[in-house]
């Protein structure tokens, strides 16, 4: 069946008001660009004519500005899930103009298949290869593409010429069966491959192929500062100590690392530590630092859902594709974040907290408990099922006006029952086997910034004797001080 090539504007006509659209990719890596932009322009034109136009939007995780940003500014989105990180989309959902429901990233594909959520009408995906018999080869990100493509009535493919066809072979596409027919997912180590190198669909569903030539909209990471470097060094020191104690095997265990500058710093510190052996990764996002560690032999293999890397690193992979094809695999997020696999392989998970409290509860999502930042992402998938779960955070923000560690988190995403280790630039709090009051002292003494230690000690003195000592009248005094006075240090207990 011949492919139907057309412009992005022509392809956008297949998307109607009220449709639910599944966008491919994971982070800006592999996310569609030209067609979402054309849909945004279509929405603006219809709105100017007084006609309604909004879509429901499923993704893998965040996307780029040409997708989330353009659609948000065009007020073209009715609802959005499961994760976002674009400024304009964040503003729209915090104004309740977009109905956003946060979701563990491993769950979206199966929730749609189970019928808990409506199936997508249209799938818009980016590919480096699309064939007349219905083979679609993703580019730098997979996300939920297989489920979106299988369930949607119409598929629009952006054939991105900036992503060479030699990327075929990096992917491992597999969808588990739904209960009661589901069997074990036969991945026992990060390098196992169990599926296909492409997504196979009924070619009749491919209603449009749009040729593009657009690099991924992956932003640059800032240079490491002293704080992020010290956090990375503390994580490496903790894991080195766990190996020496025998709690982590001498052969080490696979690493999962979150997204951002702290994650890059942590991986860099692990790579530089001579006492930590070369290790494997089983994670969502493969970042810049991993490419260098693979070339140096410090990372033996990296399994992820996307290559969220700069253009120079992506070009390095393309230039040495025969080397990297045996060392990288990209999977659907239903596999990269799967609890069965996380627990089976014994992952060491390292994620970033927006806010922690003195008892070890973690807020990953909401500023002052109300304003959504990005979303829970995959951190819950990994934290709850980890061999050992680590959370990292700088101890302060806004030049010290905010303490990342407070008496009670203003929103809880991960409870004390799942969080084992908390690390800041100041030190390490090992929360395993400790009561709430013991955890509080451990966190205050080892992780809290010096200017907040006495304040948090004073809070504990106001609390009644109880298993988890909280003063419900004062638990949010630090948040209130920041909201009213711009500085948590002005709180009183």
Image (spheres, grey):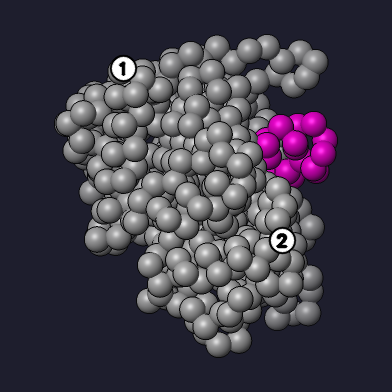
Residue count near mark 1 (Cα–Cα under 10 Å), binned few <14, some 14–19, many ≥20 = few
- Above or below, 367 against 143 in this view is below
Residue 224 image point, x, y percent: 25, 58
**Which numbered disc, 1 or 2, marks the residue closer to the eye?**
2
Q: Quadrant of the N terminus?
A: top right
Number of on-image labels: 2
Residue extent of the magenta highlight: 107-127
Q: Determine the residue positioned at 80% across, 43% down.
A: 118
Instruction: Identify residue for label 1.
Output: 251
| Separation (CA) of disc 1 from disc 2 | 46 Å
Q: Determine the residue positioned at 56% across, 80% down.
A: 491
Residue 430 image point, x, y percent: 46, 41
Nearer to us in this view, 204 or 32: 32
Q: Is residue 6 left or right of residue 304?
A: right
Q: Quadrant of residue 326?
A: top left
Nearer to us in this view, 492 or 6: 492
Q: Quadrant of residue 202?
A: top right
147 drawn magenta: no
- Above or below, 485 against 34 in this view is below
The label number, if any, that marks residue 287 in the structure image:
none
Q: Determine the residue positioned at 29% across, 39% down.
A: 237
- Is any part of residue 112 visible from this angle? yes
Q: For the view shown, which residue lies furthest in the bottom direction?
A: 485
Specify which label sits upstream in the sequence, 1 or 2.
1
Instruction: Identify residue for label 2.
Output: 464
- Is any part of residue 166 visible from this angle? no
């Amino acid at each position: 069946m011949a492919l139907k090539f057309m412009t992005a504007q022509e392809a956008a006509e297949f998307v109607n008001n009220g449709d639910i659209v599944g966008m491919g990719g994971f982070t800006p890596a592999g996310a569609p660009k030209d067609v979402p932009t054309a849909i945004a322009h279509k929405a603006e034109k219809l709105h100017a004519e007084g006609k309604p136009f909004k879509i429901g939007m499923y993704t893998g995780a965040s996307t780029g500005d040409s997708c989330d940003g353009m659609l948000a500014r065009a007020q073209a989105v009715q609802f959005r899930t499961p994760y976002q990180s674009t400024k304009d989309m964040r503003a729209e959902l915090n104004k309740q103009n977009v109905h956003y429901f946060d979701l563990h990233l491993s769950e979206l594909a199966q929730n749609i298949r189970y019928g808990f959520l409506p199936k997508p009408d249209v799938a818009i995906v980016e590919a480096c290869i699309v064939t007349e018999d219905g083979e679609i080869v993703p580019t730098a990100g997979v996300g939920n593409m297989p489920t979106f493509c299988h369930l949607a009535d119409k598929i629009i493919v952006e054939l991105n010429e900036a992503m060479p066809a030699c990327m075929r072979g990096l992917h491992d596409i597999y969808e588990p069966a739904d209960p009661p027919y589901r069997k074990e997912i036969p991945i026992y180590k990060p390098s196992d491959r169990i599926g296909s190198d492409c997504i196979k669909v009924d070619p009749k569903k491919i209603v449009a192929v749009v040729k593009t030539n657009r690099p991924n909209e992956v932003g640059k990471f800032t240079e490491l500062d002293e704080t992020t470097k010290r956090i990375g060094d503390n994580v490496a020191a903790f894991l080195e100590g766990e190996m020496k104690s025998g709690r982590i095997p001498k052969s080490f265990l696979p690493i999962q690392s979150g997204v951002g500058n702290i994650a890059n710093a942590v991986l860099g510190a692990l790579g530089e530590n001579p006492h930590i052996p070369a290790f494997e990764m089983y994670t969502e996002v493969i970042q810049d630092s991993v490419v260098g560690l693979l070339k140096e032999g410090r990372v033996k293999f990296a399994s992820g859902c996307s290559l969220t890397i700069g253009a120079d690193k992506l070009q390095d992979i393309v230039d040495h594709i025969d080397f990297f094809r045996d060392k990288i695999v990209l999977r659907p997020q239903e596999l990269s974040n799967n609890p069965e696999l996380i627990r089976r392989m014994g992952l060491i998970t390292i994620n970033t907290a927006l806010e922690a409290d003195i008892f070890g509860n973690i807020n990953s999502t909401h500023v002052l408990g109300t304003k959504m930042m990005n979303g829970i992402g995959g951190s819950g998938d990994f934290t709850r099922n980890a061999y050992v779960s680590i959370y990292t955070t700088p101890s302060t923000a806004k030049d010290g006006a905010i303490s990342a560690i407070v008496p009670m988190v203003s929103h809880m995403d991960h409870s004390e029952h799942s969080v084992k280790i908390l690390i800041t630039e100041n030190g390490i709090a090992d929360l395993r086997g400790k009561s709430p009051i013991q955890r509080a002292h451990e966190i205050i003494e080892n992780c809290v910034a010096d200017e907040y230690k006495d304040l948090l000690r004073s809070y504990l003195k106001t609390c009644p004797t109880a298993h988890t000592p909280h003063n419900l009248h004062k638990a949010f005094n630090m948040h209130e001080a920041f909201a009213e006075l711009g500085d948590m240090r002005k709180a009183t207990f």
